Image (tube, grey):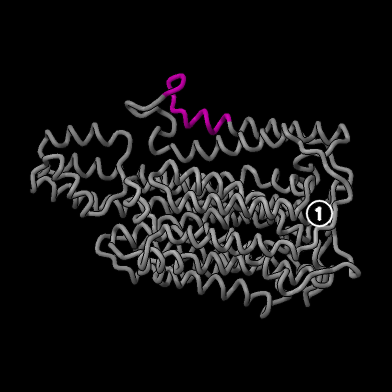
Amino acid sequence: MGTAAVAQPSDVRGSTAVLATLASAQFLMALDSSVMNVSIASVAEDLGTTVTGVQTAITLYTLVMAALMITGGKLGALLGRRRMFVLGGLIYASGSLVTALAPNLTVLIVGWSGLEGIGAALIMPAVVALVAGNFPSERRTSAYGMVAAAGAVAVAAGPIIGGAVTTSFSWRWVFAGEVVVALAIVSRARSLADAPPEHRPKLDVVGALLSALGLSAVVLGFLRSSAWGWVAAKPGGPSVLGLSPVVWLILGGLLVLWLLLRWEARVEERGEEPLIYRAHLQNRRLTGGLSLFGVQYFMQAGVFFTIPLFLSIVLGLSAFETGLRLLPLSIGLLATAIGVPRIFPAAAPRRVVRIGTFLMLAGTAVLIGGLQPGANAAIVSLPLLLIGLGIGALASQLGAVAVSAVPEAEAPEVGGLQNTVTNLGASLGTALVGSLLIAALTASLSQGIQSNPDVPQSVKDQASVQMQSGVPFLSDEQLSGALADAGVSESASDAIVEDNSEARYTGLRVALSSVMLVGVLGLFLSGGLPGRPLAGSAGGAARPAERVRGDPAPRMA
C-alpha cells in the first residue's frame, strides 16, 4: 500500500520560496473556477455561441478534473510527484494558450476543458504530496493551511480579475496571463524536493477507466437534460427505447460507479493496490467531510453561474461591474475562511459547518425573493455576503476534517479524493443549475407567449416549434435583434421581449431553488462531522478516525 514520501528534518528543503511555488500553483488551479463566470456573456458573443455553450465548457473543465484527479495522484506516486507537477504545468500552459487563441467553442473546449483540466488533474494531487515532501511534520499543517488559503483567495479574487481584464482588454488575456504564470511556476519546480515513494504502486487502469466513464456519464446526463428532456424525449430530439438519453446516461453512469466499487473490492482482496481503498469509503469522518465538500462546491458553482448571468445579461453590466458586485461574496469568504480558525480555534467542525450552511441557505433564499422584474444590482449585495460567509465557514473546517480522518502518510490520497469530490460538485452544480435555468426559462416563456393576446397565432405556432429544444438565455437587445431578423412585427416583438424578461427571472429562481435543496441535504450529511474540536485545537483532541486503511474492514456490498 502506497504512502506519501514524507520529509524528515534532516532533508527538509521547505522554505518561503517552496511554499510560494506550491501556493501559486493552487491559486492558479482555483482561479479558473471563478475567473471566467463574470465573462460568460462576452465569451459567448465573441465565439458566436450561447450561454449554454459556455456552460458546457465550464462543466467539462471541472468534470475532466474530477474524472482524472485520483488517477493523476496515482501517476504522481508511480512516476514522481515533481515530474507530474512539471508535466501538468506544461499541459496547463498549452491549454491556456489554445484557449486564448480559440476561434470557436470547439477549440475553447479542447483547450480549457480538455488540456487545462488534464494539467490540473496532474498538478493538484502533486501539490498535496509535495507539501508533505518539503516540510517537516511540525510545519506541515501550517503549509497545508497556506496552500488552502491561496485557493480561497483565488476563488474570491477571480471575479474581480476576470471582470477587470475582460472589460479593459479581452477575456482572452486572462488565459494568456495564465500561460505566463504556469510557465513561471514550472520554472521554480527545481527547488521542490521529491523524495522517492516507499514503493511504486501499480496503476489500477480498469478502476481509472470505470471512474472516468461513470462520472462523465452522470454529469453529461444532467448537462443535456434541458435540451433532451429528463425522461420523455423532446420532439425532434434523440431518444433511446422511447426515452430521453438523459435517463440512460444517468442510470448507466450510476451502474458503472457501482461496478467500480465492486472492482475495487476485488482488487484489494487480491492484495493489489486499488484506485480507491474501501477503508476510506467506510471512514465516517472522511466521507462526511468529502460529502460536505461536494455540497459546498455545488452551491458555490450554482451561485457563480446564475448571478453573473443576472448582472451581465439581465441588467447589462460590464464584466468588471459584475465582478465588483460579487465582491461581498469574496469578502465574506475570506473573512470566515481566515477568521474562524483564528478567533474560534476550538470550535467543533460540525457546528461551524452547520452555521455556514444555514448562512448559505439564508443568502440563497434572499436572492430568490429579490430576483423579480424591476430588481437592480443592489439586491445581490447582502445575500452574496451571507453566502460568502457560509462558504468560508465550510472552507475553514472541511480540509482539516478530511486530512485528520486518516494517518498523515495517507494525506496525498485523501487530497485526491477531496479534489475529485470538489470538482464533481462544481460540475454537477454548473450542469444541473444551468439545465434547470434553461428548462424553466423555456417553459415560462412558452407559456407567456401562448397566453399573450398581443402575439399573433402564427408567431405562437412558430415559437412553439422553435422552443421545443430549449431557448437561449438572451438579453432584451439580443432577443429584439433576433426577432427583427426573423421578420416578427414590432408589436409582437415587444410582447415577446416582455415575456422573456419575466421568464428569465423565473428561470433564475428555479435554478437557485436547486442550490437550496442541495444545501438542506448538506445539513443531513453534516452528522458525519466531528462534534468536538480537532486534535491540535485549543479545545482538545478529536476522537480518532473510525477506520483507517490498515484496519480490518467489512466486505463491501
Residue 242 is one of the magenta-drawn residues: yes
Asked whether residue 236 is in view, the answer is: yes
Q: Is residue 492 above or below residue 165?
A: above
- Describe residue 415's horizontal placement relative to residue 231 as left or right: right
Picture quarter containing residue 344? bottom right
Mark 1 surroundings: few (<14), some (14-19) or many (≥20) residues within 10 A? many
Label 1 sits on residue: 410
Point out residue 260 in the picture as x, y percentages from the top left corner.
Answer: 70, 34
**Residue farthest along the bottom direction in this orientation:** 343
Q: Amino acid at mark 1?
A: Glu
**Residue farthest along the top direction in this orientation:** 241
Number of numbered discs on residues = 1
Picture quarter containing residue 458? top left
Point out residue 138 in the picture as x, y percentages from the top left corner.
Answer: 84, 72
> At 38% from the left edge and 36% from the top edge, which residue is drawn?
227
Q: Quadrant of the N terminus?
A: top right
Point out residue 116 in the picture as x, y percentages from the top left corner.
Answer: 56, 50
The secondary structure type at the circle numbered 1 is: helix
Asked whether residue 285 is in view, the answer is: no
> At 35% from the left edge and 48% from the top edge, which residue is drawn?
47
As rendered, which of 506 and 421 lies closer to the eye?
A: 421
> At 24% from the left edge and 31% from the top edge, which residue is drawn?
465
- Describe residue 159's horizontal placement relative to residue 114 as left or right: left
Residue 507 is one of the magenta-drawn residues: no
Magenta stretch in the rendered image:
239-252
